[in-house]
């Protein structure tokens, strides 16, 4: 399957233009991370130099986990809208009559959901680290400023977002209602957070090796999710709601 | 001078918030300024430790941001004058253009309406369909359909709801796979490997215009031009919009357009890639008579340009007027041919006779007229006669009526419309399906 970067870019730009002009999406993308940053900040700043190390660890782990929920939740709603939303506004059929392939469509729509979410997560994480460095107790900062923790945040954010987008798109293909699609995809995007939870709460010792290992597991999950979503982005299924039998698929479309 | 780029008005750096107070960044320059001020705030808070000084610094930076936002703010490029009720073309203020721009638009319009030679290999057909069948589970949507459409032809596809018209268009447009049969579309055999090539040569305008309401007309077209990988996008958009007389609405959000204008934008979108075959699925559905007439004029202009048009419609007078040939479909193909051909094929020639008073013995009058094969009464003083040759039978019939002492009001050939043909064929199906 050949991918034309021009078409991917076109889909990407169109999606971003639509997001920008949809106030609800922009406000949600802004408010949710701020809320996610405010909660941990309050609990972190309430720690003093005399706080026990286990308490500090718990607070930091909760904060870091919340940071990882952002790249999962934000793109889930957007990707859930990606197909069923097009169908709702009648733009899906004209889109599918163009030479765009399912891979190009998926890459364009997927990257438009993943990149803003990852960017927001990184900004949020950077703001969190800076704030902790400036105003939190030194014990808290030394717990946050560790290579495995940084690696977890930097590496897991795009991987979790990719999972969330692929699952969201797959659900979007099968859904007839935008609200159902968004609720289902939010739920379906959460399970991989369990893996992240193991390392942030130190069930698995947070080392560079363990972070990379879990990262590889995420890559594997993402590949499976992308493949599944690409298979579902079948023109006939998108138009008439079900895929043609295998023997028919060799005839056309 | 090249035609002006559409939809390229640069956004202002900041805009006034619609809700709340102050300004928010819009362009990247605005975001950069905002980012710098946020960074300056963080640095200042980190460096300065006195609380009062911190408050003063933060307030000062907020003041700087507000002043910069106020100074550099403007109207969003996508902000319409009146989103809910955009005025019609006639009501709009004329857009100021340079003489060069006016000349460029005039030239593009002239080019758009100029006839061009029909394309495609001589002798071949644009669309060839052989035994095309589509089943959805047990339900047959399309059964053993065969027909062909010549290059440059306007081909009408008629049928009741659920007859399989849209399924045919979707199948030929490579959106769904046929269960059986074969087809050649725009000169390319319909196979999965050829799907992209076919889609590059055709354009389909579905019943609903399917435009992105938050994007402007030009942005909608830009998007589709990019999907077709077209070069010189600005000029092509200008040309497509000139063809549908919508150049001046290029920067309007599609959500603010009326249904008729949306349909015209959809046609402009279909013309962007200069398709060899254009599928129009119910293009005038839901349009008022004026908007329908505009679409008809566009189809006529496209025919002049040599574009092969596959038109599905419910409107029989539209098909009769616009199409070179029509096919009537009701899951299976009922008939194909020129509208006049179909009339002759389905209906025998007939003469309509009207007299002031009913004839006393019509059977005696009509039986003696050569060329009259049968007759039946048609209202008071009215008769419909089946004849083999109306031109030969009419004079003899007139003489016979006068000889019988009838006061003749009129004698004329009865002309059947395409609607009569359609209803006759569809009624046959209804009768056949009745238990």
Image: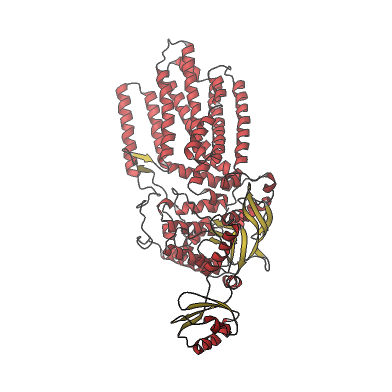
Pick whichever, B46 or B413, lies toward us: B413
Left or right of B384 on screen, residue B96 = left
Q: Position of residue A72 (x, y in %)?
A: 51, 30
Q: Position of residue A51 (x, y in %)?
A: 43, 11
Farthest residue to the front: give it: B360
Pick whichever, B184 or B196, lies toward us: B184
Q: Is residue B106 visible?
A: yes
Q: What colour scheme does the image use? A: secondary structure
Pick whichever, B379 or B305, lies toward us: B379
Q: Position of residue B110 (x, y in %)?
A: 49, 69
Q: Is residue B40 above or below residue A135?
A: below
Q: Position of residue B353 (x, y in %)?
A: 50, 80
Pick whichever, A250 or B114, lies toward us: A250
Q: Name the residue rendered at 53%, 61% in the picture.
A: B313
Q: Where, by quadrant of the figure, is residue B304 drawn?
A: bottom right
Numbered label tally: 0
Q: Is residue B81 above or below residue A122?
A: below
Q: Name the residue rendered at 45%, 54% in the picture.
A: B217
Quarter of the picture holding the N terminus of chain A? top right
Q: Is residue B309 visible?
A: no
């Amino acid at each position: 399957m050949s991918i034309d970067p021009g078409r991917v870019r076109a889909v990407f730009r169109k999606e971003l233009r639509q997001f920008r002009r949809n106030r609800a999406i922009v406000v949600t993308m802004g408010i949710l991370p701020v809320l996610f940053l405010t909660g941990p900040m309050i609990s972190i700043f309430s720690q003093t130099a005399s706080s026990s190390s286990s308490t500090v660890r718990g607070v930091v782990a909760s904060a870091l986990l919340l940071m990882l929920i952002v790249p999962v939740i934000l793109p889930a709603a957007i990707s859930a809208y990606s197909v069923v939303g097009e169908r709702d506004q009648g733009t899906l059929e004209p889109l599918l009559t163009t030479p765009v392939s399912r891979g190009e469509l998926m890459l364009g729509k997927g990257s438009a959901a993943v990149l803003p979410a990852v960017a927001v997560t990184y900004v949020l994480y950077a703001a969190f680290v800076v704030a902790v460095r400036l105003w939190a107790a030194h014990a808290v900062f030394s717990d946050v400023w560790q290579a495995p923790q940084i690696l977890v945040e930097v590496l897991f954010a795009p991987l979790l977002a990719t999972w969330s987008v692929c699952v969201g798109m797959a659900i979007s293909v099968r859904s007839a209602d935008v609200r159902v699609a968004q609720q289902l995809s939010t739920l379906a995007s959460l399970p991989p957070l369990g893996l992240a939870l193991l390392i942030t709460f130190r069930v698995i010792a947070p080392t560079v090796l363990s972070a990379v290992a879990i990262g590889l597991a995420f890559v594997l999950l993402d590949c499976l999710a992308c493949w599944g979503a690409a298979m579902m982005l079948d023109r006939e299924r998108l138009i008439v709601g079900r895929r043609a039998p295998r023997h028919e698929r060799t005839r056309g479309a | 001078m090249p035609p002006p780029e559409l939809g390229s008005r640069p956004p202002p750096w900041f805009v006034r918030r619609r809700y709340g107070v102050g300004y928010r960044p819009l362009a990247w320059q605005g975001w950069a300024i905002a980012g710098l001020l946020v960074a300056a705030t963080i640095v200042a808070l980190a460096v300065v430790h006195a609380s009062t000084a911190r408050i003063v610094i933060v307030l000062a930076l907020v003041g700087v941001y507000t002043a910069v936002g106020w100074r550099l703010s403007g109207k969003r490029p996508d902000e319409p004058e009146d989103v809910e009720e955009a005025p019609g073309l006639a009501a709009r203020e004329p857009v100021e253009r340079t003489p060069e721009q006016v000349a460029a638009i005039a030239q593009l319009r002239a080019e758009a309406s100029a006839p061009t030679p029909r394309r495609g290999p001589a002798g071949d057909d644009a669309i060839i369909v052989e035994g095309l069948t589509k089943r959805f589970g047990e339900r047959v949507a399309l059964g053993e359909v065969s027909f062909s459409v010549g290059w440059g032809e306007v081909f009408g596809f008629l049928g009741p709801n659920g007859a399989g018209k849209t399924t045919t268009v979707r199948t030929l447009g490579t959106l769904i796979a046929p269960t059986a049969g074969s087809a050649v579309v725009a000169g390319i055999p319909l196979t999965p490997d050829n799907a992209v090539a076919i889609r590059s040569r055709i354009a389909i305008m579905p019943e609903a215009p399917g435009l992105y309401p938050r994007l402007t007309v030009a942005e909608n077209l830009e998007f589709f031009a990019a999907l077709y990988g077209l070069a010189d996008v600005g000029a092509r958009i200008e040309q497509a919009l000139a063809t549908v007389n919508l150049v001046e609405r290029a920067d309007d959000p599609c959500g603010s357009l009326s249904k008729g204008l949306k349909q015209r934008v959809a046609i402009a979108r279909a013309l962007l890639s200069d398709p060899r075959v254009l599928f129009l699925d119910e293009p005038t559905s839901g349009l008022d008579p004026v908007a329908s007439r505009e679409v008809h004029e566009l189809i006529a202009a496209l025919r002049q340009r040599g574009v092969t048009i596959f038109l599905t419609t419910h409107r029989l007078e539209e098909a009769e007027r616009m199409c070179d040939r029509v096919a009537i479909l009701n899951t299976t193909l009922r008939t194909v041919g020129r509208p006049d051909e179909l009339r002759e094929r389905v209906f025998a020639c007939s003469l309509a006779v009207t007299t002031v008073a009913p004839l006393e013995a019509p059977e005696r009058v009509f039986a003696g007229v050569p060329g009259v094969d049968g007759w039946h009464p048609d209202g008071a003083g009215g008769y419909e006669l089946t004849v083999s040759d109306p031109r030969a039978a009419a004079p003899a019939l007139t003489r016979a009526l006068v000889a019988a002492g009838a006061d003749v009001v009129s004698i004329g050939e009865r002309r059947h419309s395409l609607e009569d043909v359609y209803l006759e064929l569809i009624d046959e199906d209804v009768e056949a399906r009745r238990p």
